[in-house]
């Protein structure tokens, strides 16, 4: 995933870490991976699974079938700080658009 110390590219769109979109929709990889690994052991999965934070789910009124929810109870600044440190350490491995 292309990124730098200020933001990330998702589908050729640059999203800054301090943007409302990032603050609302970003999910920490450390919260996502255990869920993903547990899905690998399932055999009766639907063809599509949507993943969102619990906070986002609370704001939705549509049918939430085939959704999985991740707790989002830590400040985004904690994982953004980790992400920036990771980028600074491994920046030579990232392709910047």
Image: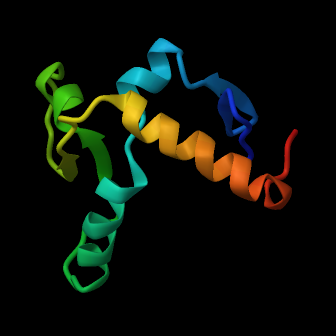
In this picture, residue 21 sits left or right of residue 85: left
Residue drawn where x is 28% and y is 41% of the image? 52
* Image: 85 above or below 41: above
Residue drawn where x is 53% and y is 17% of the image? 18
Q: Quadrant of residue 40?
A: bottom left
Task: Name the spot of residue 28 as percent of width and height, x first.
Answer: 38, 47
Residue 48 appears in view: no
Q: Nearer the viewer, residue 61 or 36?
A: 36
Q: How is the image coloured?
A: rainbow
Q: Quadrant of the C terminus?
A: top right
* Image: 87 above or below 24: below
Q: Quadrant of residue 73?
A: top left
Q: Quadrant of residue 78?
A: top left
Task: Name the spot of residue 69 as percent of width and height, x first.
Answer: 19, 47
Residue drawn where x is 47% and y is 19% of the image? 21
In this picture, residue 68 sits left or right of residue 30: left
* Image: 91 above or below 18: below
Task: Name the spot of residue 88 as percent of width and height, x first.
Answer: 72, 47
Task: Name the spot of residue 70 as percent of width and height, x first.
Answer: 21, 47
Residue 5 appears in view: yes
Count all numbered tags in the image, as a single digit.
0
């Amino acid at each position: 995933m292309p990124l730098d110390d200020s933001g990330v590219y998702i589908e050729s769109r640059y999203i800054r870490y301090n943007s409302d979109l990032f603050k609302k929709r970003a999910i920490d990889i450390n919260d996502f991976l255990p869920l993903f690994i547990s899905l690998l052991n399932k055999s009766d999965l639907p063809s599509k699974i949507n993943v969102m934070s619990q906070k986002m789910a609370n704001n939705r009124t549509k049918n939430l079938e085939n959704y999985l929810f991740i707790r989002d109870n830590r400040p985004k600044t904690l994982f953004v700080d980790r992400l920036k440190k990771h980028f600074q350490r491994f920046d030579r491995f990232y392709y910047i658009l």
